[in-house]
């Protein structure tokens, strides 16, 4: 699993909280990488926020500071976007894991990932659904609620913590 985070997005606290629940549910069957996007010229002190600390407390989660290359490689555009791949590297889920902007609670994203975790297969996580553009095959998708990862206004130092609505 890969989750992309804007280090100053207040909405992403809920995403990190839901990630903690997912990791506990997985019982070690899921590895997660949280990619913290650091704009050029900002430095690690800007990136190592309370979200960084919270993600580091979750067993099975690795944190990565990214200048945007990894997040773009995974197609992430919004803070909190989560992608789940099977053992063969096939995308099984892409979307948000919160019910709304900054809100915890039952939601379609967590439910979809739990279903993947709880449906073992020889390929690894869940039944393979194939690639996004493969004819007749679709991965699960849900809306993502959070700050844009790459919009200039979301990366200005004087606008830290303000989420695009």
Image (cartoon, grey):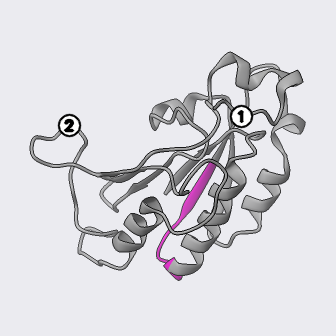
Membership of 144 in magenta stretch: no
Q: CA distance from mark 1 to mark 2?
A: 31 Å
- Residue 122 locus on image (x, y percent): 23, 74
Q: Which residues are magenta?
A: 26-34
Give the vertical position of 22 relative to 134 (above or below). below
- Residue 76 locus on image (x, y percent): 50, 36
- Residue 25 locus on image (x, y percent): 53, 80
Furthest residue in direction bottom, as rendered: 27
Label 1: which residue? 163
Furthest residue in direction top, as rendered: 152
Residue in front for this viewpoint, 34 or 165 = 165
- Residue 110 locus on image (x, y percent): 47, 65
Give the vertical position of 25 relative to 76 (above or below). below
Left or right placement of residue 101 versus residue 121 in this view: right
Membership of 27 in magenta stretch: yes
Label 2: which residue? 133
Mark toward the viewer: 1 or 2: 1
Residue beneath the point at 72% across and 19% down = 153
Residue in front for this viewpoint, 51 or 144 = 144
């Amino acid at each position: 699993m890969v989750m992309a985070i804007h280090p100053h997005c207040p909405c992403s606290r809920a995403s990190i909280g839901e990630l903690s629940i997912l990791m506990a549910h997985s019982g070690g069957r899921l590895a997660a990488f949280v990619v913290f996007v650091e704009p050029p010229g900002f430095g690690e002190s800007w990136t190592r926020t309370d979200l960084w600390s919270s993600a580091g407390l979750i067993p099975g989660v690795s944190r990565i500071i990214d200048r945007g290359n990894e997040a773009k490689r995974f197609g992430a555009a919004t803070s909190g976007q989560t992608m789940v791949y099977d053992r063969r590297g096939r995308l099984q889920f892409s979307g948000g894991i919160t019910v709304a902007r900054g809100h915890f609670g039952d939601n379609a994203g967590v439910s979809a990932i739990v279903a993947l975790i709880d449906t073992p297969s020889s390929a690894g996580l869940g039944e393979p659904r194939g690639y996004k553009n493969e004819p007749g095959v679709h991965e699960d998708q849900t809306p993502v609620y959070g700050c844009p990862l790459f919009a200039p206004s979301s990366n200005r130092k004087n606008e830290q913590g303000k989420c695009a609505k």
